[in-house]
Image (cartoon, rainbow, N blue to C red):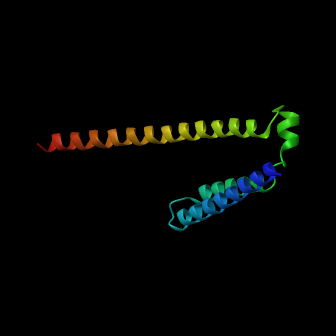
Amino acid sequence: MEAKKMIIQIQIFGILFALFMFYITFLHQRRNEFTTKESIFWFGAWVVFLTLVIFPTYLDFFIKGILNFSRRLDFFIVMGFMFLIGIMFHTYTIVRKNQNRIDKIVRKIAIEKQNKK
């Protein structure tokens, strides 16, 4: 009985988190900080998250049957790490592109200043 109560508490926390993230995504979309594609991606991600929180056994046939994970938690930990590593790589590539753009702009400004003298 205690385990079921804890699972329900975790589900409530997950639902509140998903609703909060819906709101944050909506705010970013309203401020035009997200493109339409980004908004659709994040709203979709929160719908999937909310579905998995409400129906945690929904993917058991896939997780336990096809992927042979013994526990659901193992699967979600592995997927979480994969997602975080992917997001970190994506962020790194964006930072690197911006750094290269800044370098080009600084060089261009330096050359223009040198030519004016």
State left or right for residue 87 relative to residue 69: left
Tag count: 0
Q: Residue at x 80, y 36 (%)?
A: 71
Hey, which residue is sitting farthest left in the picture? Answer: 117
State left or right for residue 98 relative to residue 108: right
The image shows residue 96 at horizontal and vertical percentages of 44, 37
Q: Residue at x 85, y 36 (%)?
A: 64
Q: Nearer the viewer, residue 35 or 109?
A: 35
Hey, which residue is sitting farthest top in the picture? Answer: 68
Hey, which residue is sitting farthest bottom in the picture? Answer: 30
Instruction: Give the vertical position of 100 relative to 21 (above or below).
Output: above
Q: Nearer the viewer, residue 65 or 103?
A: 65
Instruction: Give the vertical position of 93 relative to 22 (above or below).
Output: above
Instruction: Give the vertical position of 104 relative to 7 (above or below).
Output: above
The image shows residue 21 at horizontal and vertical percentages of 61, 59
The image shows residue 65 at horizontal and vertical percentages of 88, 35
Q: Report which quarter residue 60 is drawn in.
A: top right
The image shows residue 87 at horizontal and vertical percentages of 57, 41
Q: Report which quarter residue 113 is drawn in.
A: top left
Q: Residue at x 69, y 38 (%)?
A: 77
Q: Quadrant of the C terminus?
A: top left
Q: Residue at x 56, y 59 (%)?
A: 35
